[in-house]
Amino acid sequence: MEQKVKTDVFKGVIASSGIAIGKIYLIEEEEYCIVPKKIQKQNIKKETERFKIAVSKVKEELINAKKEIIKIFGKAHTLLADAHILMLEDPLLDRDVIRKIVEENVNAEYALWTTIEKVVLSFEKIDDEYFRERKNDIQEIGKRIMRQLTSNKRRSITDAPNDAIVVSHNLGPSDTVKLKERMVAGFVTDVGGRTSHIALFAQDLDIPAVVGLKNITGVTNHEDVIIVDGNQGIVIINPDEQTLENYRRECDIQINEKKELQKLRDLPAQTKDGHRVTLACNIDTPEEMKAIINSGAEGIGLFRTEFIFLRENRMPTEDEQYEVCRDIVHKMLPYSVIIRTLDLGGDKVMHLGLEGFNPESNPFLGLRAIRLCLKYPEMFKTQLRAILRASKEGKVKIMFPMISSVSEFQMAKRLLETAKQELRTRNVEFDEKIEVGAMIEIPSAALTSDIIAKEADFLSIGTNDLIQYTFAIDRMNETVAYMYEPLHLSVLRLLKHIIDAGHNAGKWVGMCGEMAADISFTSVLLGMGLDEFSVPPSAVPRIKKVIRNISIEEAKDLAREVLNNNDKDSILNVIRKSQLV
């Protein structure tokens, strides 16, 4: 009698949407038995040289991988390889490992791994997704060096059959090239998050991917059947025939839907009765530009500039910031780019050497975003000058994050005027009429948005923070995340108040939070009068379809009905009923 294979279901983080069905190509994680071995004093120099040679070989591998990435994906996609090369070149890595070898008379493998573990431990104490991803990069670098030291080799994607699904602990720069070369159907990894470099590559390759699965490599076998559901962040190992058949049907539906949505690419975001809105994209790094251009978006509604400050262990220069902004602005022509000024807490920028900065117990509610920029005006003006210079190269708007009051917005505008004057003194041209907006993501700003709107050229609602600050919860905290409720009447009333405040002042109002990308809310937001939706590239076609299938009068009626209901269930019923019509 044939033994029934057990079906397992795992939940991870969505890296790239879509569904893939195939056989696993497993890249098992190497297991190293790292024990300290005493090195004779006369062999210490030889041991340090062995470590340096291993680092040199890894660097050579990365440089070659970078060349291949440029050839296949373009220069904009070298961020991961560049980050790994920078980590290898960090003098602290060399210094700490070599010092351990010399002072403790231990082997290079032990010195390297204990140093890496120490760095990783320090990163784990920082509650920030970006830094959690850098922890994974550091571990990956450590393993690369370890492979050289031990002459250990792992299974390569080069040998993966076409349409296989790669299962791995993590994927490095050279792996990304091989993913394309081997035409893999999808991949899943133990580590990673939605902002990880490999997630961005998956989106660019347009292959389904789920990451952050903890120990998927430890519970799967080579050539097991696997379903990767990148729409829900689910991975199913050895599915039964009924599940398999259901997903095959879903695959066919999505392929046909994708073809239909593709037809909307060059059509405007316009209701049945001709009401136009702007459908733009959010962007974290230059690597996403190709996906944005292919999506049919009309501009960038939120360019997050944080990566410029986090990619190196120093303050970026005006020229470096200008070059990044200029390149994105050029590529987005003839559409506009809204560049948000630095939105980081002090805990993330300690490496920038800000004088007089003290670590905070709660950086999320502390010196961050516009508050940090106002405290360090020279840093702020450097970024403003860079953005202003880029405004001469295309259509640029500036947005200040985390505004809490009109006086704060006015202070930021005064520093912008100073930056303009400094450029005039240098005879540097910029857009003298550049628009300046306020990001409304704090209840105090939402409630006084009528006053702020008189000072701003536009308002953009950041729903992620606005909702969590309204309910006084951390949406990333599993114990209270259920309270994060976009359809709560208090949130809906705040949104309507902000939109009306902007319109009463003659200003347009956009939204760049997660709520803007959820098709469940599109018609309601449209009916409330929202002028601009800024969403991830993958959401553009679906949002456009909803907009083009409703009239503005129908949307207004829906918004009125929703705002007249008192509880979430009633509001949900109204929305569901409208979607069935």
Image: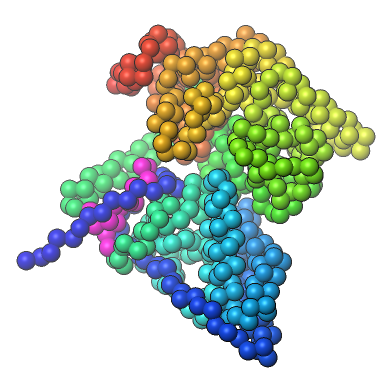
Q: Is residue 516 left or right of residue 285?
A: left
Q: Position of residue 286 (x, y in %)?
A: 62, 47
Most distant residue in the bottom direction = 42
Q: Is residue 576 above or below residue 39?
A: above
Identify the residue shown where x is 64% and y is 60%.
82
Identify the residue shown where x is 68% and y is 16%.
452
Q: Is residue 119 left or right of residue 413?
A: left
- Quarter of the image containing the N terminus? bottom left
Q: Quadrant of residue 348?
A: top right
- Quarter of the image containing the C terminus? top left
Q: Position of residue 555 (x, y in %)?
A: 43, 15
Q: Is residue 505 left or right of residue 135?
A: right
Q: Position of residue 330 (x, y in %)?
A: 69, 41
How many dots with numbers? 0
In the rendered view, how is the structure colored?
Answer: rainbow
Q: Is residue 63 above or below residue 397?
A: below
Name the one closer to the observer, 297 or 566.
566
Identify the residue shown where x is 66% and y is 49%.
310
- Which range is magenta? 224-239
Q: Quadrant of residue 574?
A: top left
In the rendered image, residue 226 lying in the magenta stretch gets the answer yes
Most distant residue in the left direction = 1
Q: Position of residue 484 (x, y in %)?
A: 44, 29
Is residue 517 at all visible to an observer of this figure? yes
Name the one closer to the observer, 253 or 442.
442
Name the one closer to the observer, 443 or 453.
443
In the rendered image, residue 237 lying in the magenta stretch gets the answer yes
Q: Is residue 51 above or below residue 484?
A: below
Identify the residue shown where x is 47% and y is 16%.
490
